[in-house]
Amino acid sequence: MKRPPLVCQKTGKSLESGRKNRWLILLLPITGLLALIWFLIRVVPKPSRMMYPCQRVAFPLASGFVIWLIGILGSVAAMRRARRYFRRARYVVGILCVTVSVGFIWLALSSTAEKVALADDPVPNASIGVAKGIYPGRVVWAHNPDATDWDGAGYGHWWESSHTDQNSVDEMLSRSLVTLANEPNDFLAWDSIFRYFNQTHSKGDVGYQPDEKITIKVNFVGTHFDAGAVDTDTYELVDGYWIDYHHVGPQMMLAVLRQLVYNVGVNQADIAIGDTLCYFSKNFWEPLHDEFPDVNYLDYAGGNVLNPRTGVGFSGSALYWSNHPAGNQDYAPQSYEAADYIINIANLKTHGGAAITLGGKNHFGSLVRWPAEAGYYDLHTSAYAAGMGNYRVLVDLMGHPDIGGKTVLYMIDGLWGGEYAHAGDNAPIKFSTSPFNGDWTSSILVSQDPVAIDSVGFDILWTEFNDVTCARKSGGEDYLHEAALADNPPSGTFYDPNHDGDVVRLASLGTHEHWNNATDKQYSRNLDPINGTGIQLVTGLYTMGDFEPDGDVDFEDFAVLAAAWKSQPGDGNWNAACNISESIDGVIDEYDLIVFCENWLN
């Protein structure tokens, strides 16, 4: 006889579904146990596998299972002791045991509730967009711990010449430029950089020409006009909250000016440098002005008689926001419209509202009004929005023809990295992750791809900081997705920041991806130099013959060379192959083999 269905005596509802789905109760412990076993089998023999995507998913499940198990066992043990004490009429101790039992359950639930969120870590090596540059997607990262030396607050200020070695900064920048362009010296490196820009902007196969103007956008947000960080009579930094804020430092600016004047041959009067929303303090201006007195030092107010600066103002180059917000019309600064080229120098730092503030957000200072100024579109609305797939004003700034469109070189001053609008006194901090290992960041990053360089900066900051309200804030990398796919962005926005009448949306502004793991720091073009389509990160200082590159000249480099041997223009593998030519003739042949052998044998 068939058993009658079970029903509730009060409600009359069936109880069968609860019985049928009772196996679901075991789903969490079974999944957690399997994740723990998998994690132990894979990671214990080789700890570096901890950074693999599958292990970054398995670890929160495994750790959650362990905490859950401890909570359950601890709770059961405490409850048994409580019963024993109640039987003996020891009520106070029994109540304490019950409290401990409840505490174990609460610990298990609260500790595991959000662990799975780590599974949302960036997906490695999933490149999007179109890489830019002589060597597409190349980002050069130079790191020299000897460049910086400071004992922190109370021991002078990081920006003083005694704490940053100018010779080290000059050398780091020189080697970075040579590596970026794959040229034997600074002059040829700059010539290649300018020629690439001019060829891709319909200006012909020419390098820098006399009398062409260059504007250098630096980040001085700590001295913005209403911060009170600069005494406007003396133009000295005011001792207080902002005194050690990590700006682009005078040593970095001096290194760039030396490159432009001495190696490129730019007249000092054809160079403008500064941040349009900020004061150019005497502490930063003096070491630059002493060597380059005729450079135009941009300043929000224009300085004064004792400390002359170049004032800023609106140009006639209109800037539109692509989601068509209402408000006063925005324009690019005068110095931007007048410039033939722009160099973007950002800082390596996180941001309490926008997650990160690198090259893209550096352009918040590429206006002549405060980002949230009344009557204008509030840029913070877009930049601070959480989540992915949103309209991002940074894409309009990066793509405007008189702002991002004129940028010939992108740099990140990572000599003194840190956090902004989030951490204490906003001073630089030492990073714990590799290669910093508890020291100052002491780094310079350069690229011709605005999206690629910010992507690398994002990975560095994501690895160092765990705060979900800052570096790991949801949507912190959204502008990189929007910029890489500007021609068809996830938000569906029609990015057209200059409204030139052609109604033509922006093309891809560069390539975005994440490295494979924080130990190896490999991107798609590192893993596959011939067929990779994303970023190529060159760390340290470039070695001739290191075609891969990984810092060594070995058989792997010979394999790359052999795969591209004697390629000619028009060959199917030409675009990838020409990127490793070191004989500066565009053909992979015996001359490149000689370069390889000389460095391999040495």
Image: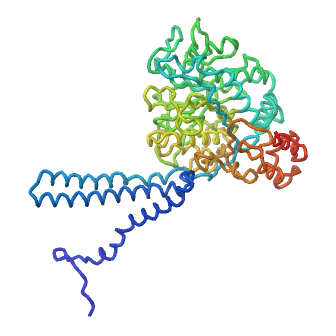
Q: Nearer the viewer, residue 163 or 300?
A: 163
Residue lying at the far bottom of the rendered structure: 1
Residue lying at the far top of the rendered structure: 306
Task: State the image coordinates of residue 285 (x, y, percent, origin top left).
Answer: 61, 15
Identified at 77% across, 32% down, the residue is 194
Q: How many marks?
A: 0
Task: State the image coordinates of residue 339 (x, y, percent, origin top left).
Answer: 70, 26
Residue lying at the far front of the rendered structure: 88
Q: Nearer the viewer, residue 222 or 423?
A: 423
Q: In which quadrant is the N terminus drawn?
A: bottom left
Task: State the image coordinates of residue 550 (x, y, percent, origin top left).
Answer: 71, 44
Against 265, residue 81 (above or below) is below
Q: Nearer the viewer, residue 34 or 472?
A: 34
Task: State the image coordinates of residue 409 (x, y, percent, origin top left).
Answer: 69, 33
Is residue 338 among the parts visible in the rendering? Answer: no
Identified at 71% across, 35% down, the residue is 541
Q: Nearer the viewer, residue 25 or 147?
A: 147
Q: Which of the 4 image quarters holds residue 264?
A: top right
Image-based side of 207 in relation to 156, left or right? right
